[in-house]
Amino acid sequence: MPANVDQQAFREAMSRLGAAVNIITTDGPAGRHGLTASAVCSVTDTPPTLLVCVRRDAGAHDVLRVNGALCVNILAGRHQNLSDDFGRHGIAVEQRFAGGSWTQLTTGAPVLIDAVASLDCRIARVAEVGTHSVLFCEVAEIVTAAQPEGLIYFNRLYHHIGSPLKSPDEAYA
């Protein structure tokens, strides 16, 4: 039996859990689509697997399921506007993709060329929990940028972290 927890209190508490901002993309028989997501988590490294939680009423949900493949594109601060585009309802799919430069890897899912990291995956299993599907994704290929930086969503705001330094001396100037 579920605990008697107020939905708004739960949402407020979860807003305090900082999370990386990602654009989840797919392409295949059901077409090209994408959405912004922060509910992404490593599951295991043997085999390399992660999970992505997607609302079942999201426009990309059924497209992801039919295509059976996705790419988790981990964003940097410079991608904040792109994150907004992929997170807004009513923006056409072509418009979402117009804000970035894309390529593809093993699965054919769109890969953001200047992402901090991109994990190209095949969906191995799906679990339904409440309003969401939890997609368990086996990683087929990985690309990472030379400089680690990130875009975090915390307390309903974006935060840029790990901006690259030009040299160790500039860190203390």
Image (cartoon, rainbow, N blue to C red):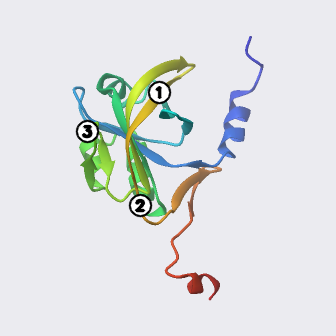
Name the disc covering residue 135, or none. Answer: 1
- The answer to whether residue 52 is above or below residue 75 is above
Where does label 3 land, which residue?
A: 108
Rate crowding at label 1 as few (under 14), some (14 to 19) or many (20 or more) other CA atoms within 10 Å. Answer: many
Kindly identify the amino acid type of the residue bearing the numbered disc 3. Answer: Gly
Kindly identify the amino acid type of the residue bearing the numbered disc 2. Answer: Ala
Judging depth in this view, the residue of 149 and 2 nearest the camera is 149
Where's the C terminus, which quadrant? bottom right
Where does label 2 land, which residue?
A: 145
Answer with left or right where residue 97 lies relative to residue 51.
left
Q: Position of residue 23 (x, y in %)?
A: 41, 45
Q: Secondary structure at mark 2?
A: loop
Q: Position of residue 5 (x, y in %)?
A: 76, 25
Q: CA distance from mark 1 to mark 2?
A: 25 Å
Q: Position of residue 48 (x, y in %)?
A: 48, 36
Q: Residue at x 49, y 80 (%)?
A: 166
Rate crowding at label 2 as few (under 14), some (14 to 19) or many (20 or more) other CA atoms within 10 Å. Answer: few
Which mark is in front, 1 or 2?
2
Q: Of the two numbered discs 1 and 2 on the same chain, state the one appearing first in sequence.
A: 1
For this orientation, the residue located farthest to the front is: 46
Judging depth in this view, the residue of 119 and 87 nearest the camera is 119
Kindly identify the amino acid type of the residue bearing the numbered disc 1. Answer: Leu
Quadrant location of residue 161?
Answer: bottom right
Q: CA distance from mark 3 to mark 1?
A: 18 Å
